[in-house]
Image (cartoon, grey):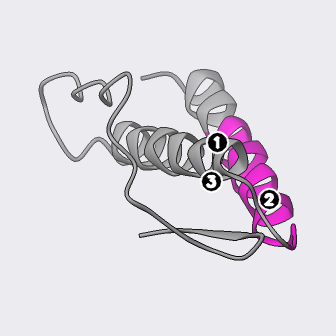
Amino acid sequence: MTFSFTLEVIVVIIQVQQQLQSMYEIPNRNLQTAQQIEQLQLRLQYLQQYSMGECRAPPQRPPEQQPVSVMQRGSQVQVI
């Protein structure tokens, strides 16, 4: 991995972290927002594993879509 490539990965990690932080601050999240948060969390995990070179083999891609466990109370949705 070259330095510039590593730097690009770090920049993407920071962008994903910022997106997640802004989504965490949304009151009364709906199901779509909860799913977006979960997808961003998976992407962040993938990028972090990749950037740290935890595996010598290429990291596994996160699953395209996983079932979301959701608890809905009133107008609030929680991802479990």
Is 52 in front, or is 29? 29
Asked whether the beta carbons under mark 1 and mark 3 sit within 8 Å of each other, the answer is: yes
Element carrying mark 3: helix
- The mark that comes first in sequence, 1 or 2, is 2
Residue 28 position by quadrant? bottom right
Residue found at x 75% / y 68%: 24
User: Which amino acid type is marked by label 3?
Assistant: Ala
Q: As rendered, which of 43 and 57 lies closer to the eye?
A: 43
Quadrant assignment for the C terminus: bottom left
Local SS, label 1: helix
Q: Which residue is mark 3?
A: 34
User: Residue 48 location, x and y as percent?
Assistant: 44, 48
| For the residues bearing labels 1 and 2, Cβ distance under 8 angstroms | yes
Evaluate if marks 2 and 3 touch, with contact meaning CB atoms under 8 Å apart. Answer: no
Residue at figure coordinates x 64%, y 49% from the top left: 31
Element class at badge 2: helix
- Dot label at residue 23: 2
Q: Which one is in front, 11 or 20?
A: 20
Could you tell me how far apart the alpha carbons at marks 1 and 2 are, in whole angstroms? 9 Å
Q: Is residue 77 left or right of residue 69?
A: right
- Crowding near pointer 1: few (<14 within 10 Å), some, many (20+)? some
Mark 3 Cα-neighbour bin, 10 Å: few <14, some 14–19, many ≥20:
many
Q: Is residue 7 above or below residue 41?
A: above
> Which residue corresponds to mark 1?
36
Amino acid at circle 1: Gln
Q: Is residue 26 above or below residue 55?
A: below
Region rendered in magenta: 10-27
